[in-house]
Amino acid sequence: MTAPDAADLARLAARLALRALHDELSLYPKPGLVSPRDAGSHEDMDAGTFLRSLFALRHYYARIAAAGWHDADFPVLRDLGIAAETRMLRATGGVNTHRGAIFALGLLAAAGASLWRRGVPPDDAAWRAEVPRRWGRGLRLAGAAAGTPSHGMQVAMRYRASGARGEALAGFPAVFDLALPALRQARSGGADWQATRLHAFFTLLAEVEDTNLLYRGGQAGLEWMRGEARAFLADGSVFSPGWFARAQAVHRQACARRLSPGGSADMLAAACFVFGWQAHMEAA
């Protein structure tokens, strides 16, 4: 395989990141979340809102991958993320569609580029170690210096959940321990891409401390969603007849309860990004 230069790698990272975000958006039924079929539990956004956000982010992932390639320190990545968030909010009229994905996929894109420049194959072990190794100190300092906490930060503190920053500092266990193995399991089991993503998503719902769920439904909402996801998996997940109707029933109940597991959606997109990057490497 001919190693790409910085510009080629940045374009690849951007293409894979946008594809992963679209893979998350287009998946249905995701309990409580926006898709082209409906707006889930949301009244302030729909699939069109997400598509405008995606278009606004089209250059961000290339820029942050290039920053990772060039060994940039955390403040550079942070400033790129802040600028991307500003473009997102401008495109959506102030609606937060992708703040978590800007953070998670941005760090993973920078980490993948950093590994590739050094000639380190971005397997799971290397990739999950790169973010805390390279930017862990900056992440901790940024957290300590943060001003008014976001909803996610407030909820993480209240419920002692790890939140997005804790997930990154731990090397994205939701991605590498949960979603990626689930994607691979479903693919190897013959599932199509829709069923594969849904299996991974319910795997995340069954375990992740999703601060979006905690914000909307408290501990009871989180435990309800976990219970439904675990029952779906125990009943055979996407490998048993009637899986689509069962998933759709959970989606409708989540909408009725106004629950929206946006943190798990971000982790699904992140896992699709890593999955796509690694598949590209194997095929190259």
Image (cartoon, rainbow, N blue to C red):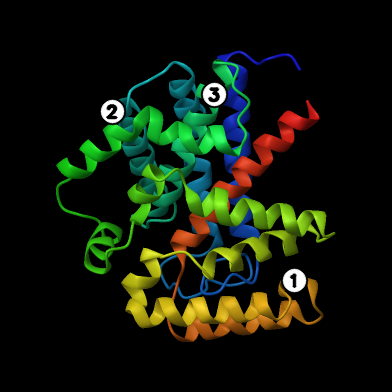
Instruction: Identify the amino acid type marked 2.
Output: Pro
Which quadrant of the figure contains the N terminus?
Answer: top right
Percent x, y of residue 192:
80, 59
- Quarter of the view holding residue 11: top right
Answer with mark 3 or mark 2, whichever residue precedes in sequence.
2
Inspect this view and state whether residue 193 appears: no
Residue at the disc numbered 1: 238
**How many angstroms separate mark 3 from mark 1 (CA)?**
34 Å
Percent x, y of residue 17:
57, 40
Answer with mark 1 or mark 2, whichever residue precedes in sequence.
2
For the residues labelled 3 and 2, say whether their Cβ atoms are less than 8 Å apart.
Answer: no
Answer with mark 3 or mark 1, whichever residue precedes in sequence.
3
Neighbor class of circle 3 (other Cα within 10 Å; few <14, some 14-19, many 20+) is some
Q: Is residue 262 above or below residue 282?
A: below
- Please name whichever residue, 118 or 76, is drawn nearer the observer in this view of the structure: 118
Instruction: Identify the amino acid type marked 1.
Output: Val
Q: Residue 75 carries which label?
A: 2
Q: Which residue is drawn at 55% across and 16% down?
A: 117
Q: Is mark 1 on a helix, strand or loop?
A: helix
Residue situated furthest front in the rendering: 125
Percent x, y of residue 88:
40, 46
